[in-house]
Amino acid sequence: CKMRFVPTKDEEKWAKEETAKTRGAPLLLWVISGSSVHKVWPHATPFVRHLLKVFPEAKIVTVGDERCKVIEDEWKDDARVVRRSGAWSIRQTMAFARECNLVIGPETGVMSSVAMLPMPKIVMLSHSTAENLTRDWVNTHAVFSTQTPCYPCHKMVYNWSQCNKFEATGGAHCMSHIDPNGLFEVVLKALDIELPKKEVASAGNV
């Protein structure tokens, strides 16, 4: 693929400096939300806490727009979550993503910017399928609901009049039904880590 994000020398230097300040084993970038109401995973808050419980040396950098700060505030008491929503430009976020051990998020421009890079990616699909979005991406794991009749809708929506909201979570049906246990298993696979099954299963207690 010849179309790709290329950081400037200054952006590349900045990203490496930020990485040096944000050491983690592993270092994850969590893209909280995309541009549509169905591009946010409603189980993120407890799931991130579970990740940090299992991987106490990890650092998770969260990014998004100003609205994502409401979600980020749930992790404000844990220094291992580096909250950058509304603070970094899109170019800074994409430059930093290139330095991470794993990038997780919904269908967003940030995920697309690292599609052909070697680090593992996990994309939570809401309106697309792996066939028409991530099939040819490098080292990419697509996760999606298997119990949502309206998935995939193949459309962009910007308010709830155009989308099916799952009242129990406050998120879209398609994202609400992406199973935490299943996602955690994909995280382990992406990082090539094996854990006892009980630790994997407990990810579902969100």
Image: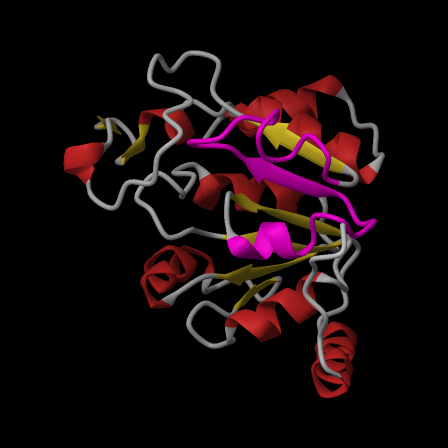
Q: 2 or 158: nearer the eye? A: 2
Residue 147 on the magenta segment: no
- Horizontal side of 170 relative to 101 (left or right) equals left
Residue 202 in sight: no
Give coordinates of residue 135: x percent, y percent.
68, 30
Instruction: Give the residues drawn in magenta, as a range.
Output: 109-137
- Horizontal side of 22 relative to 60 (left or right) equals right
Q: 127 or 81: nearer the eye? A: 127
Picture quarter with the C terminus: top left
Query: Who's the residue at 58% across and 73% down the image?
Result: 91
Query: Who's the residue at 37% across and 55% down the image?
Result: 71
Residue 15 in sight: yes
Q: Which quadrant of the view contains residue 171?
A: top left
Residue 67 vs 32, above or below: the answer is below
- Horizontal side of 61 relative to 25 (left or right) equals left
Give coordinates of residue 130: x percent, y percent.
60, 27
Q: Which quadrant of the view contains residue 137?
A: top right
Task: Residue lying at the far left in this picture: please name it.
Answer: 161
Query: Who's the residue at 53% across and 26% down the image?
Result: 129
Q: 172 or 115: nearer the eye? A: 115
Give coordinates of residue 41: x percent, y percent.
43, 39
Residue 206 vs 80, above or below: the answer is above
Residue 122 on the magenta segment: yes
